[in-house]
Image (cartoon, rainbow, N blue to C red):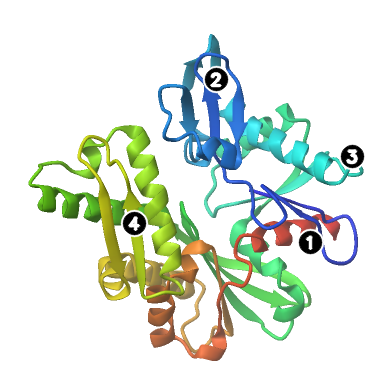
Amino acid sequence: IAAIDGQQVGEPHKIGEDDRHPLPSFVAINKNTGEVKTGLDAKRTISDSEEYQVFSSIKTVIDEDKSWEIAGKTWTQIDIAAELFKALKRNVKDKTGGAMEIKNAVVAVPVGFSPKKKNNVRRAAKKAGIKVTMFISEPTSAYCSRLDQMKKYKNVAVFDWGGGTLDVAVLRIEDNVINELATAGMTLAGNDIDKKIAEKICLRVANKTGQRFSFDDLAPEFKLRLLDLCEQAKCNLADEDVASISIAKLDKYGRALEKLDYDFFALLIENEVEQAIDCLLTALSDAGMNRESIDCIICEGGSSRLRPLQSKLLEYFDRDKLVFPRTAMWDIGSGAAEIAFR
């Protein structure tokens, strides 16, 4: 998540964890003191499950009626989400020397984000002193971040594949009005790929050591640590042919030092890539379009950087119709800021 200033003409301020990276949606609460950490500070506590309760993606449970008793206080999913809004608000104030403060916000959400989820996000923002003025779908927001570049196109599809979801929106632009013709989505995304890699790593270690265990047998803190390393390796394979995964202690099962090569990785995620392409084709069909009639496909989200996906897209569509990620971490926020400004 990130705060991007849409109140002035020109290059917007980008403030997340720092000016280069959005704030990771991690929240950690000390089980004894109730101290709250967010972002990278929270992510670094994942190996210390005895001291901290760590929440890695509150968006996935924002509509559930859950609560946690931590340090003598009852925490709801709204309370936890509010900590992320508070962190953004602090970062904006600190990094601008108090010159800027978030009071209102346009919030981009996944396709199909339910009214209950939106209401809970609105309540979480309110607890942080922020008024949500409107919600926009993440794919449409991503389109809005490229308005100048998109002026020549009439029929545009946005393919936004991130860590938690794939969101596809097919848009028609007429007389500067954006119409959403069709949307599609699925929950199979980057986090599932990370887990699939982690499961393979555990299988390799088990076979080498003669131990019988699987990823599900690991303690929570070791699961999170291994998933983090698998995510890093996955990202490295966007530019490299081999990535290493090294963890000194894989719970009680010893050390893991494995290499992941591109060919193996491409085969491993072949099914996920096919499902993602099918989701895109379904959205095009629902909008009454096909490979020939769509003018442009904007690829967004970290998972859109995966080379196996890009290779498969190039088999289906002409290269000049595909726009691959540039600053995938910021584009959705930039689009929301553009809407707020306009």
Mark 4–mark 3 Cα distance, whole angstroms, equals 42 Å
Q: Which residue is mark 2?
A: 75
The mark lying in front, picked from 1 and 4, is 4
Mark 1–mark 4 Cα distance, whole angstroms, equals 39 Å
Vertical position of residue 111 compared to residue 39: above or below: below
Circle nearer the N terminus (2, 1): 2
User: Is 60 displayed left or right of 79 in the figure?
Assistant: left
Kindly check if marks 2 and 1 are in contact, taking CB atoms under 8 A apart as contact.
no
Q: Nearer the viewer, residue 300 or 94?
A: 94
Residue 67 is at least partly visible in this image = yes
Q: Which residue is mark 4?
A: 245
Vertical position of residue 293 compared to residue 283: above or below: below
User: Label 1 amino acid?
Assistant: Glu
**Helix, strand or loop at mark 3:** loop
User: Label 2 amino acid?
Assistant: Trp
Circle nearer the N terminus (1, 3): 3
Image location (x, y in percent) of residue 158: 56, 70
Q: Which residue is mark 1?
A: 338
**Helix, strand or loop at mark 2:** strand
